[in-house]
Amino acid sequence: MSLQGWGRYRNYDSEVLECLLPRSVRTMVSSGAGLIARGNGRSYGDAAVGEITTLMCGGLSRMKAFDPGTGILTVEGGTLLSDILQAFIPRGYFPPVVPGTKFVTVGGMIAADVHGKNHHQVGGFGDHVTQLKLVVASGELVTCSRTENPELFLATIGGMGLTGVIVEASFKMRPIETGWILQKTTVAQDLGGALKVLQATDELTYSVAWIDCLATGKSMGRSLIFTGEHATREQVTSRMPQAKFFPATMEPKLSLPFDFPAWILNRASVSAFNEMYFRAGARKAGPPSLVHWNPYFFPLDGIHRWNRLYGKRGFLQHQCVVPEGNALAVLGEMLERFVRSGKGSFLAVLKKLGRGGGLISFPTSGYTLALDLPATADVFPLLEEIDKIVVHAGGRLYLAKDARQSRQTFEAGYPQLSAFKELRRVTGADRRFRSHLSTRLGI
Ligand SMILES: Cc1cc2nc3c(=O)[nH]c(=O)nc-3n(C[C@H](O)[C@H](O)[C@H](O)COP(=O)(O)OP(=O)(O)OC[C@H]3O[C@@H](n4cnc5c(N)ncnc54)[C@H](O)[C@@H]3O)c2cc1C
């Protein structure tokens, strides 16, 4: 079967096996090689495509147990975040961490140790996982946690499926009073201003900045910063007396029916979009207002198959994190290169991250910048230049978004890589679990 990542930049041929029960996963693993688990295929590049065989885990989707006393939810690895939200928001619980789309599986969230808009406060999704059941290279089912097989546990969080197949996971949900978010929009006129606002909102639960990466001169890095808190019942009643405390889930209303032609996204169209978006956002700045949880956390999910916007050639997302100390200079240099190249993106996001969780988890204290770019030939040398800036600053790139970084860039960014590789060697995972990403980067 031909498989792609969300960026649709390359097609890979892979044998595909459907996983429906944990015990069938054990048989598939013990009799296969060059395997990797795939959740919902929302990683952008080649992480979820097996070198030989891809194990489709979407069938492992049963919710097994929930303890309202502790908030601990146990689900199978292929359970979709969207299903968890639908079942638990009306019960007054929210996942501890959510990425920018709800169409991901729990196995995928753990394997990428995904970060949300609250990473600076609560860490990654992996920080809230209490236990995992993993099918390892021998085909055995191994339970691991911070106290039981802790090395395997910490390698699996952020380990991109390269230690085994997560068939079950337990994690702690957080109680919420309503399904509304009290959102505040703040305008920053340049990059320095955006970093100051993100720094100043450190005490708030959620924060993220949309950054206009084509603005030039004094406006370079101008941003809209969206902060948010789960609204209390009192806040909802006083602002919207008729509103339900737990509004229904919103399904995507629009769908891109075909691949857009390549010429649609160019400097002029992206600049015009950015100008419009910035002005519209700036008009909403001021006192906080209530927003449904769905558009606050998952704005892109409103358009089904939005990845067709970039046409058949696909797109790349460049997401890096750089240490806080010299972030202004480093991010400034990166933005300047993007502006100069005219390769700006309409989707550029800046977030503050806290410390990392797993052995090769992406997050580390600093600022993360993510940009989508069409996969045209001239984008590759530009991104290599940007990678050099990241490496020089002591930063790294996110594996879940990567389709092209070099081995040197990767190795420079992940200081615990040798411990991760050693664990793979000792457990036999290096021979059994291999994705196109792991082969490309020599993991
Ligand atoms: C619109 C959009 C917004 C996003 N926003 C964010 C964000 O804000 N923060 C963030 O951190 N990420 C973000 N992401 C990335 C996304 O959260 C991750 O790529 C996530 O891993 C995707 O989950 P998935 O189930 O689709 O996994 P896949 O893409 O199918 O797989 C991703 C990795 O997980 C492994 N894996 C999947 N299932 C299992 C399993 N059962 N056992 C073992 N390994 C497994 C795969 O081998 C692969 O290495 C975003 C992606 C999109 C498309």
Image (spheres, rainbow, N blue to C red):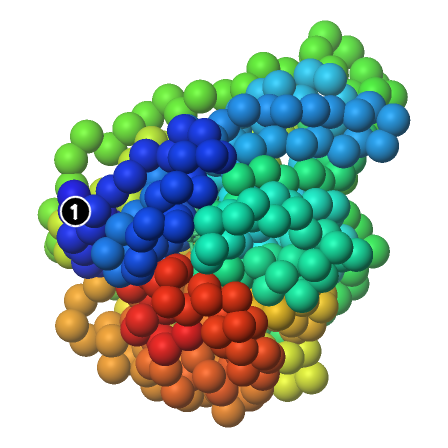
- Based on the displayed image, in which of its 4 quarters is residue 65 positioned? top right
Looking at the rendering, in which quadrant would you find the N terminus?
Answer: top left
The residue shown at (58%, 38%) is 168
Residue 3 is left or right of residue 334, and the answer is: left
Residue 319 against residue 97 in the figure, above or below: below
The residue shown at (60%, 64%) is 155
Residue lying at the far top of the rendered structure: 242
Residue 118 point in image, percent of width and height: 70, 51
Residue 186 point in image, percent of width and height: 66, 52
Residue 442 against residue 157 in the figure, above or below: below
Comparing 264 with 8, the one in front is: 8
Q: Is residue 430 visible?
A: yes
Residue 347 is left or right of residue 134, and the answer is: left
Residue 412 is left or right of residue 143, and the answer is: left
Comparing 228 with 365, the one in front is: 365
- Residue count near mark 1 (Cα–Cα under 10 Å), binned few <14, some 14–19, many ≥20: few
Residue 432 point in image, percent of width and height: 38, 61
Count of numbered tags: 1
The amino acid marked with disc number 1 is Ser
| Secondary structure type for disc 1 | strand
The residue shown at (79%, 25%) is 67
Comparing 392 with 215, the one in front is: 392
Task: Find out if the beta carbon at label 1 lies less than 8 Å from the nearest ligand 1 atom.
Answer: no
| Residue at the disc numbered 1 | 2
Residue 436 point in image, percent of width and height: 29, 64
Looking at the rendering, in which quadrant would you find the C terminus?
Answer: bottom left
The residue shown at (47%, 34%) is 23
Comparing 105 with 237, the one in front is: 105
- Based on the displayed image, in which of its 4 quarters is residue 141 positioned? top right
Q: Is residue 100 visible?
A: no
